[in-house]
Amino acid sequence: MHARLLATGGVLIGLVATGLVPAAQAVPPTAGDVAVTLPDGRTAADARPAAHPVAAQVARTTLRAGAKSDTRTATADVTGFGTVGVTWESAADTGDLTVQVRTSEDGRTWSPWETVETEVGPHGTVDGTAPLVVGEVARVAARVTGPGVARIDGLTLAVVDPGESIADDDVPAPAEAVSPHGASVATAVTPPTAPAINSRAAWGADESLATWEPEQGQIRAAAIHHTAHSDTANAYAAADVPAILRGIYAYHAKTLGWGDIGYNFLVDRYGRVWEGRKGGITKQTIAAHARGYNTNSTGISVLGNFDTGTVPDAAVDAVVRLAAWKLALHGVDADATTVIGDATLPTIFGHRDVAATACPGASLYQRLGEIRRRAAAAQDAAAQDAAAPDPTALVVPHGTFVRHPDGRVAMVENGRGHVASCTVVQHYGATCAGARAVTAAQWNALTPGGRLYRTLHANDGRIYYLQDGRKKEVYDWASLDAAGLSRTSVSSGANAITRLPYGKPVVRGGVVVIDRSNGSLQLVVDGKRSPLPSSFDGHTPIGALKHRKLDGPSVDRMTAARATNGVVRLEGTTRRYVLSTRGLVRIDGTGSLRSATDVRVWDPTLKRVVPTVVAKKVGKVALRVQGATRLYVLKNGVLHPVASKSRLTRIFGGTTPTVHVVLRTTKVEFPVGTAW
């Protein structure tokens, strides 16, 4: 048995025969490790395309101008259980366009027009719509409307015929659930029993279309989707599912050029789970289902349109089983929150939570809370079963260092053992001599973890650098680079270092820190934190700087500087600027500032990331306060009111100057003199 997580927050070290070896030596299973039984008794791994399969085909029809100048239309025949979509050249701006599709079963009577959402690709481009499953219809029509339609090149209606496969005759029935034989990472949450998962072969995937090479990420959440179906295709039969999957696969892989299907897993309305993107169902394979979140989430899509239809209970049950198992496999609590990028999300979230889309449909989205609770309950039940009393076991807190009889030392974290050098151990606030002695059998009970380094990448996305027994929260990887510290890191739960006090965080200059404890903003200048009024964040280029959250104790340990006020001197120079709504305006040529004007010193790093509007010395500068109409001229550190624009033009020798808009906080730093 493996080491198991106890409710006490410690780790139960049991007895097994395996040794503590580097994680890279472990060989994780792939889809074939989860058994699936076909109707004739074969396993899904035995299911192969027929001797003469009919490959999926994509027919393309160009959309032409109609009677209205803002409309493009096309009509095409549909063969097989069809999937359709509209594509265009990737450089197009389609924000003001509406794409709609309708179908006909006899070529004469047409269904109502249905709007199809656009699909953001893995590289951030919008090259077409999402695939729309239309089923066995005779004809399909597409129209694109909007004032900008004339500037869109390459508008094409793509119709996918999914072809034929032995999978269409041997559709897997829901099988008894079985446990996987391992995982690609050690878990911090005990995995429940794995659901039955039908392999790619079981739905007849043509692997020649799969040009994308699998890449691995770090799973922190599950993103829930639905697939676009026409109203008539929502009521698909069980035997239609392999063809539906092949249609979506061909559209994603071939028509949009993604090289594979976009989802990691798909669930049908009968409660069956299907393997999506290749790469291994127990691995942390990166798919293409939620732009910006693919690396850290697994994509689960339920076949059907649940804006127009009601999600079946069987499908919800399958999502619960799949999410509970998959998330636990990677140490993720199904009913918690996580940080991906700068977003704090539930560990089971809907596509609409991170993108402008209706996906996964109102009916399914309303049940996500239920799915989280039930998946977490399944994980808890599995943990209780795994934590049965073991008379040979002992309990140690997370982050404890243990010592093998041969002298090796490792940190215990969520059932994993991270082998470490004595130098690294000291930076974690411990010593090799003080490590807890364990038997070889107890050592071997630990799941192999990555080697321990001073840089720790926590499962929730936070980064820490360990120094002299303190954890220094790291703003981002670039901050490590700027500080000359190593990016080589260990992946671990943050609970391994909970006991350690905070140190001064590692934060590069020219960024904004958000205090997790109270939401306050801090502009980082020369390693110091300068309180940032929200007006500067919302109305000046500072708002475009990178923003990222740090723990309150980390922020407290940064050296404090005076609050940002918009009057700036560049470090090491006599150059002075005011911060306008567009950027920095140089003012040292206007004369000396008065002693009452409070100037903030900026280091070159911050100066490089905030645009400079006026870089050369000028004799005087025209200013206006945001939201006000009063004009001023700054000269010799004094603001002189000006009655009108015509008067301002005369002051500047007949040339109308640029009026730079500043915030009221900046304006009050200058005394107001006589009117000009």
Image (cartoon, rainbow, N blue to C red):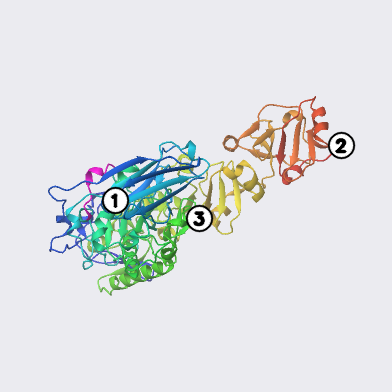
Label 1 sits on residue: 247
The disc labelled 3 sits on which kind of residue?
A: Tyr
From what the image shows, is residue 664 above or below residue 199? above
The disc labelled 2 sits on which kind of residue?
A: Ala
Work out whether residue 334 or residue 458 is closer to the camera in this orientation and state it: 334
From what the image shows, is residue 290 above or below residue 60? below
- Which label number is shown at residue 37? none
Q: Quadrant of the C terminus?
A: top right
Residue 295: x, y in percent? 38, 49
Q: Are marks 1 and 2 in contact (CB under 8 Å)?
A: no
- Nearest-to-viewer mark from 1 and 2: 1
Magenta-drawn segment: 203-211
3 or 1: tag closer to the N-terminus: 1
How packed mark 3 is, by other alpha carbons closer than 10 Å (few <14, some 14-19, many 20 or more), is many
The disc labelled 1 sits on which kind of residue?
A: Gly
Work out whether residue 115 or residue 394 is closer to the camera in this orientation and state it: 115
Give how far apart the Cα atoms at labels 3 and 1 are.
Answer: 53 Å
- Dividing the picture into quadrants, the one containing residue 448 is bottom left
- Which label number is shown at residue 502? 3
Work out whether residue 40 or residue 390 is closer to the camera in this orientation and state it: 40
Left or right: residue 664 versus residue 456 is right
* Secondary structure at numbered mark 2: loop
Label 2 sits on residue: 675
